[in-house]
Amino acid sequence: MNTTPAYQSVQPPFTYDVIISGAGPVGLFLACELALANCSVLILEKVAQPHSPLKELPFGMRGLSTPTIETLYRRGLLQELDIHKRIKKPHNIPTEARQQAGHFAGIVFYQDNIDTSQWKYRLPSETAPVLLSEMAELESVLYCRATALGVDIKRGLPVTDFHQTSDGVTVTSGEQSFSGKWLVGCDGSRSVIRKAGGFEFAGTEPEFTGYSTLVDIANPELLKPGRNVTPTGMYLQSQPGYLIMQDFDGGAFHHAKAPITAEHVQAVLRRISGTDVTINALHIATTWTDRARQATTYQNGRILLAGDAAHIHAPLGGQGLNLGLGDAMNLGWKLAAVIREQAPTDLLDSYYTERYPIGAQVLDWSRAQVAIMQPTPEARAIYAIVRDLIDTRDGATYVAGRVWGVYTHYDWGNDHPLAGHSVPDFELEDGTRIGTLLRDGQGMLLDFNAAASLQTWAGKYADQIKYVSGPAKNQLGLSAVLIRPDGIVAWAADGHPDYSALQQAADRWWVGEEG
């Protein structure tokens, strides 16, 4: 671990293991993962102050998906989040009303329609499949953990240039320079690292301009509550004054970068809502689009990308944050293992091969929502069909599984159906849960039958894989499970272990004593 206190400045010729551009949730969480594995980490952040008003408003709320919740739980961070514990059911919703569980293109799916028995390997555990959190709260929790682990965070220092060699990277911020073995761009959709690093950013152009605003409305009763898809767009008033809109102008207003005035917001709102609503004052406003692009590779030499630097899409369903945190969890332990020479040299190739398809799925999911929200007769017809499908049990279960990330997995072509999926949160007979045993960031061989041969095998990886034995209260018919540091199942056995398959799985991710 980097033992240098966070308040001290480490100057060249010190070489960090990793330099990260961007101190948002993705950059902070990646730094935590690297520092947990005893890597020295520097974060350079262009913004001097960590929070903005937008992050603390209701539209700064984000739905945390199942993989993200499991990730935070496995690192002991979930209990630090407090917002979701204080969110109450709106007082104007009748107690007998169906509980909304999420939406697809504004089409709500309901909790009582979701058949969780279809999710074979998801056990009842301490984590919910979806939770709400504020961006500001999440960043604060991750910042505290990063500094506690010794991460050096420098604010007000944007990356202005960098140069890489076969051995490392020199990063420049104004007149200051820093040395690192690796550089990771977590610097958002306008990523300097991506642009200067020569990454291709392929995808599609926007269909609409989105607005997130805080306004004073003279006659809010003219607006319907909740999310409303209209023949000319969409508007959402979650609370009085907190307004989100989608105007299908091809992203023209957003790209024009014109001032957002109360008069303009009022005109857009009147056109979309079909009312004579009046806005008395505009306090906060920002625009966004459904532009969907993805880097065609996530690595160029010693330069890597994660989060919005690697992929952007419309924030429909709030999957961007979850996708970025998934990148950080996947990359963190792999980059640390390569730095510490505890993994095959080509391990980093799997970062792209695993995360790119997940990102591509999210971009297509976003595009599909935009397509059926278009103000055209054809889109409205498809919208009606999808709405009817989502109102069925199988339809709601499928959409929930996609929106919540329950179906997220890596396809390795393995024989066992659990391989590549998140490990179930098994509870051992003494009450210990597997999620709590992953907090140190090590891999794990979970042996329900306490086989001496498996314990001996695990000894070859004693500094990377810990051996845990004993029966669980519900083993799902499994006898043993090999778990990566990110909680992904690398190998599983239902009966007598296939040691050849176990060794093959281990060779893919670790270098043992004989490696």
Image: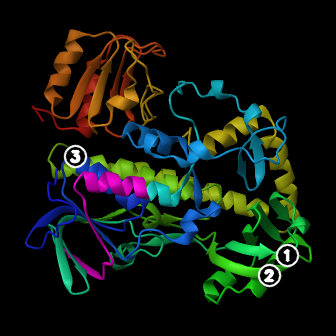
CB atoms at circles 1 and 3 under 8 Å apart?
A: no
Residue 317: give x, y in percent of width and height.
64, 54
Relative to residue 191, is residue 399 depicted above or below?
A: above
Q: Residue at x 85, y 75 (%)?
A: 218
Residue 238 in view (yes/no): yes
Q: Amino acid at mark 3?
A: Ala
**How far, Cα to Cα, is label 1 from label 3?**
55 Å
**Residue position for label 2:** 280
* Camera-nearest label, 3 or 2: 2
In this rendering, would 447 be left or right of 203?
left
Residue 408: give x, y in percent of width and height.
52, 41
CB atoms at circles 2 and 1 under 8 Å apart?
A: yes
Q: Amino acid at mark 1?
A: Ala
In this rendering, would 255 be left or right of 410?
right
**How far, Cα to Cα, is label 3 from label 2?**
53 Å
> How packed is label 3: few (under 14 Cα within 10 Å), some, or many (20 or more)?
many
* Camera-nearest label, 1 or 3: 1
**How far, Cα to Cα, is label 2 from label 1?**
6 Å
Relative to residue 437, is residue 497 depicted above or below?
A: above
Q: Amino acid at mark 2?
A: Asn
**Residue position for label 1:** 218
Mark 2 or mark 1: name the one nearer the start of the chain. Answer: 1
Residue 159 belongs to magenta span: yes
Relative to residue 381, is residue 48 depicted above or below?
A: below
Residue 459: give x, y in percent of width and height.
15, 23
Residue 149 belongs to magenta span: yes
Q: Residue at x 20, y 43 (%)?
A: 343
**Residue position for label 3:** 37
Secondary structure of the residue carrying numbered label 1: loop
Magenta segment: 140-164
Mark 1 or mark 3: name the one nearer the start of the chain. Answer: 3
Q: Residue at x 23, y 30 (%)?
A: 465
